């Protein structure tokens, strides 16, 4: 009887989740959304998508080239500006610019914290505290500072949305170095924030891509790890083994080959989080979603055995 109830509860949950997908806000054209990290990848593609849907988009770019590309491709409803989420003065400048661009009594409907970097991927023993600081300053601290500064404008909209870009590695830490740890921090921060602002009518969603072909997956990853390995002590090199770099390169190439070139599933998830009446807390998107979910919730001793 217990098993029947469990199965019924699972079926009911997913049936309701599927049904609630179709409930969207009545009118989202003209609402204002801020996106960070719009030079390339998910951020750039999302800016193009939201502009086409009729949103007013504030696109934060790290480079002039990124800003110029979107200015040429998009309508006048998209406004680009330079933004470095690691610098408080840049965030403050963005806040003042957006305040002047927003109509009177109009708030910010959505904040998409997309800016992120990869950093060295792999063996934790080879990573220095500077490697952690560099990755955390963008992926975690940047997300926290952007959200903290723009929460008043999100409250002003009456039903604001915060969408934080995480990763499957944020849910299940099977590799990844500082990047994985930063995304675990994003998940924890988002969960805490979601509960704090729920009564303020602000919804917080986490996007967890599994593997997509963006500029994060670069050839220089192998070169970076080779440099870290060469600078390590002989004791560490012996512990890692002579085949470490060869195996690492093979793993990275396999990971790149398995990444999906089509970014639409991730964009669909973000758009849903922005436009749905009942946005999800988490969106696990990409290849092997069920496989990754199963791994995340299996007992540790089982996953450790498999990954070993």
Image: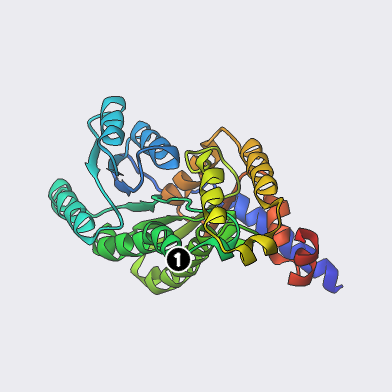
> Could you tell whether 75 is left or right of 102 in the image?
right
Q: Residue at x 30, y 29 (%)?
A: 69
**Residue at the extreme top:** 72
**Residue at the extreme right:** 1
Q: Which quarter of the picture shows residue 239?
A: bottom right
Q: Residue at x 25, y 63 (%)?
A: 149
- In this picture, is 45 found above or below 147? above
Given residues 187 and 275, the one toward you in this image is 187
Q: Which quarter of the picture shows residue 286?
A: top right
- In this picture, is 149 found above or below 51? below
Report x, y in % for residue 165: 46, 53
Q: Residues within 10 Å of mark 1 (few under 14, many from 20)?
A: many
> Could you tell whether 77 is left or right of 142 in the image?
left
Report the quarter where the C terminus lies.
bottom right
Q: Residue at x 46, y 63 (%)?
A: 186
Report x, y in % for residue 117: 43, 50
Given residues 68 and 245, the one toward you in this image is 245
> Could you tell whether 91 is left or right of 308 in the image?
left
Given residues 296 and 48, the one toward you in this image is 296
Report the quarter where the N terminus lies.
bottom right
> Could you tell whether 43 is left or right of 12 in the image?
left
- In this picture, is 129 found above or below 42? below
Residue at the spot of label 1: 190
């Amino acid at each position: 009887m217990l098993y029947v109830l469990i199965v019924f509860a699972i079926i009911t949950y997913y049936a309701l989740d599927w049904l609630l997908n179709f409930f969207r806000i009545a009118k989202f054209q003209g609402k204002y959304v801020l996106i960070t990290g719009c030079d390339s990848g998910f951020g750039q593609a999302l800016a193009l998508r939201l502009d086409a849907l009729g949103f007013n988009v504030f696109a934060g770019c790290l480079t002039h080239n990124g800003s110029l590309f979107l200015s040429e491709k998009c309508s006048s409803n998209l406004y680009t500006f330079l933004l470095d989420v690691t610098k408080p003065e840049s965030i403050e400048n963005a806040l003042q610019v957006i305040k002047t661009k927003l109509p009177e009594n109009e708030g910010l409907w959505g904040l998409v914290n997309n800016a992120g970097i990869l950093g060295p991927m792999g063996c934790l023993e080879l990573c220095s505290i500077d490697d952690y600081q560099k990755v955390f300053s963008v992926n975690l601290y940047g997300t926290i500072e952007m959200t903290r500064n723009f929460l008043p404008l999100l409250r002003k909209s009456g039903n604001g949305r915060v969408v934080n870009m995480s990763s499957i590695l944020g849910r299940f830490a099977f590799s990844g170095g500082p990047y994985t740890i930063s995304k675990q921090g994003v998940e924890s921060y988002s969960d805490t924030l979601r509960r704090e602002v729920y009564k303020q009518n602000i919804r917080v969603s986490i996007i967890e891509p599994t593997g997509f072909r963006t500029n994060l997956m670069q050839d220089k990853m192998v070169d970076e790890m080779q440099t870290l390995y060469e600078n390590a002590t002989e004791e560490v090199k012996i512990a890692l083994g002579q085949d470490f770099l060869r195996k690492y390169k093979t793993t990275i190439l396999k990971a790149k080959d398995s990444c999906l070139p089509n970014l639409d599933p991730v964009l669909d998830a973000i758009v849903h989080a922005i436009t749905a009446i009942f946005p999800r807390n988490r969106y696990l998107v990409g290849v092997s979603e069920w496989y990754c979910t199963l791994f995340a919730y299996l007992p540790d001793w089982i996953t450790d055995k498999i990954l070993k």
